[in-house]
Image (tube, grey):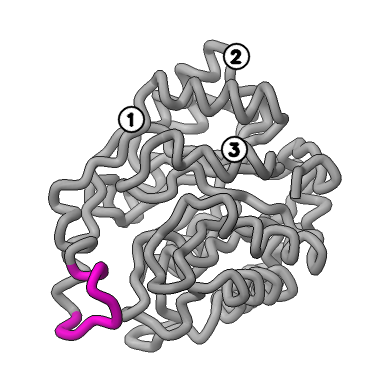
Amino acid sequence: MATAKSGKVIISCAITGSIHTPTMSDALPITPDEIATQAIEAAEAGAAILHLHARDPKDGRPTPDPAVYMRFLPRIKQATDAVVNITTGGSVHMSLEERLAAPLLAKPEMCSLNMGTMNFGIFPLADHYTSWKHDWEQPYLRGSDDFIFRNTFRDIERILKTLGEEHGTRFEHECYDIGHLYNLAHFVDKKLVKPPFFVQSIFGILGGIGAEPQNLMFMKETADRLFGDGYRWSVLAAGRFQMPFATHAATMGGNVRVGLEDSLFIGRGQLAVSNAQQVSKIRRILEELGHTIATPGEARDILALKGGDQVAF
């Protein structure tokens, strides 16, 4: 089974993302101060890995600007031992060069890496709101019926070589569908991805695999068949599926991801007040099930990371 050798469960927390917009929740961190504060609190609650995007402090729209990242990355590093994981996904409106600007500057221990090009539909979210905090939000959401998130084989190889081989960054390989596992297997065969690699199975995004228990089983079975003991498995699910899927995955030997990037809620119809609240909830569930939560140091050992002293922030 491709579980952590130590038996410890790694909790990742995705702090802000680029899917949700400021109108949807007052808890969504926007400014560098808010992102840093919530990231630190999530680490204190038990998250070993912090997955980070940046937003324009003026209106909350996603930004690739390295200067914005550098307003919160050093503060997080100074205040916590958690692994910092920077997106290479950014948003669908960013070029590959824009998406790589901050990671190449920061040289983090981990980055996310979407394992394929896909439709990425967030337009149904717009139907739930009639007024907006900022003018950009509604067009951004509704226009996603024509969004394509691009990561070609050439794009992925470039990221693996420039960030991975040149800077020692390892990846949260984000797999939104079965085909993405086979894309990853291609790079494993080419020796551009080496064990122990971290597979994040993602469920419930319109354009990817659906959040159904049968799909969770199928993704795990496929990954086991392709990768054997060479990988470490984690699961996230969007929206209301977040906690049930994380719990199910943990019972199957997996690691878990929560955070306001993936869901704004803590329970049915109840908005979360922070990322730390979600981390605390999944930690409580996991510990009640008899699992032990991995520390940042244990996560580094499990995933063979280069260490927080080897980053550039």
Our reading of the magenta stretch's main secondary structure is loop
Q: Can you identify the residue that label 3 sits on?
A: 171
Q: Nearer the viewer, residue 137 or 255?
A: 137
Which amino acid type is marked by label 3?
Phe
Q: Is residue 69 above or below residue 168?
A: below
Q: Quadrant of residue 23?
A: bottom left
Going 58% across and 63% down the picture, which residue do you hit?
A: 13
Which amino acid type is marked by label 1?
Gly
Instruction: Report if residue 73 is visible in the image.
Output: yes
Q: Position of residue 81 (x, y in %)?
A: 81, 60
Q: Is residue 292 above or below residue 151?
A: below
Residue range in magenta is 129-138
Q: Is residue 265 left or right of residue 229?
A: left
Which amino acid type is marked by label 2?
Lys
SS category of the residue bearing label 3? strand
Q: Can you identify the residue that label 1 sits on?
A: 179
Q: Position of residue 255 (x, y in %)?
A: 60, 53
Q: Nearer the viewer, residue 57 or 251?
A: 57
SS category of the residue bearing label 1? helix
CB-based contact (under 8 Å), mark 3 and mark 2: no
The total of numbered circles placed on residues is 3
Instruction: Report if residue 301 is visible in the image.
Output: no
Going 68% across and 53% down the picture, which residue do you hit?
A: 84
Q: Is residue 141 left or right of residue 232?
A: left
- Callout in the foreground (2, 1): 2
Name the mark on residue 191.
2
Going 79% across and 37% down the picture, which residue do you hit?
A: 306
Q: Nearer the viewer, residue 256 or 95?
A: 95
Q: Is residue 136 magenta?
A: yes
Q: Quadrant of residue 138?
A: bottom left
